Image (spheres, grey):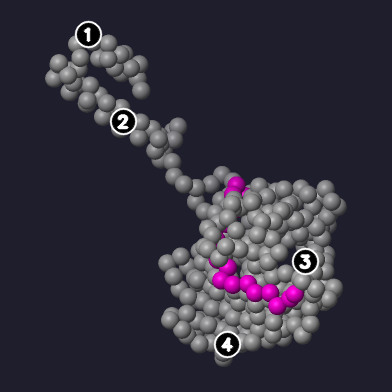
Amino acid sequence: MKTGQKNSLVQIRGNNKPAACNPALFLHFFSFTIICLLLACSQRQTGSEGKEESEPETVSLLGDRNFENGLSLRGNDSGNPLTGKFLTPYGESGQEPVWLLAEWGSKYLLQQDVMVEKSETKVYENQGKLISFKRADKGMIIRMDVKTSAEYQQPRKPNEFWPHLLIEQGFSEMPRVDDLKNLFLFFEGRLLYSRSFMDKKTFNPDLHTAQFQLFLTVQDRNLSSPGYGDYLWFGVPFYDFRYPVFPRYAAQDFAKDDATGKFIYSLGSKDYTEESFHNGAWVIVEKDLKPHIDEALKMAKERGYLAESNPEDFRITGMNLGWEVPGTFDAAFELKGFDLRCVTVGK
């Protein structure tokens, strides 16, 4: 506001006569007030150089968010990562799928020929699991069920494999962590059910649970780096049978023969929500993961991991999302609106 305008306002408010007694003065004051309000709105919408401010542009890291090109099946053995088979819920598009479906440690593998359609939902189901896809306003509604009561003949023992049901993809655009201003996670989910088939004598919380979670790989992609290819796992756990609320976790990946041995940094539940998926209601998550990824890299370095890599070498390279069930449980989770969107420095 200009100085002359401010003085004019003081003069009006300082007049000996009430404004209501002077119609012309009242109209002058009213017109001036409207102008000030319009100027204030204009100032809020423009930057210091008179340019309109706008929300920063976010770019999705996910390819084929509607699963139009289907999923490549990875089978049940991480040592034999691709089977040459596919799920094509919306028909064969002629394009290579970017999504993969991993069922590590499972006896019962999903196949395309078991698909049925129920109320516009494409459903794949067998004795051990279910996955379904339904188009919606917010992308896809995806349901994922595991039925390890059919998988386990006895409670899982130390170092034994466990069933997985994971959707995965590697990112075509792999942003450098140093170039990220934000990495936003958008997620809506709910637990449909979780039933334990273990009694107090057989249940060991150090060995047995059902977990639904997201993991990102943060990897050294600098070809000139001595640590090229080294990485850490960055986790966002949504549900764990053992804990309605859980703390952060940071340790080495172990517990089975094909464990990667890499550093795992997993958020605590209160890092992204005050709610609990244990309640069965929809929970909305909107969280900037960038500060936590920075902390994960820092902690990994402090603990002796990623020793041959420099901070500028790391990129966000891929993700997996779904169930890991090292216990005898039947459980189901439904999600929608899932996305990972980044804002790079300078944009």
Label 1, secondary structure: give it: loop
Query: Which amino acid type corresponds to the residue marked 1 in the rendered image?
Result: Asn
- Between tags 4 and 1, which lies in front? 1
Q: At which x and y percent is residue 164?
A: 70, 75
How far is the residue under mark 3 from the one under mark 1? 80 Å
For mark 3, what is the residue?
205
Q: Residue at x 74, y 76 (%)?
A: 198
- Between tags 1 and 2, which lies in front? 1
Query: Which amino acid type corresponds to the residue marked 4 in the rendered image?
Result: Gln
How far is the residue under mark 4 from the one under mark 2? 62 Å
Mark positioned earlier in the residue sequence (1 or 2): 1
Label 4, secondary structure: give it: helix
Left or right relative to 44: residue 197: right
Q: At which x and y percent is residue 252?
A: 82, 60
Task: Identify the mark at residue 16; answer none if there is no mark.
Answer: 1
- Looking at the rendering, the stretch of residues picked out in magenta corresponds to 180-199
Left or right relative to 30: residue 131: right
Asked if residue 222 is among those painted magenta in the image, a careful observer would answer no
Vertical order, 152 against 322 (above or below): below
Asked where in the image residue 333 lies, by quadrant, the reply is bottom right
Residue 213 appears in view: no
Q: Nearer the viewer, residue 155 or 52?
A: 155
Task: Identify the mark at residue 112; answer none if there is no mark.
Answer: 4
Query: Which amino acid type corresponds to the residue marked 3 in the rendered image?
Result: Pro
Q: Residue at x 33, y 17 (%)?
A: 6
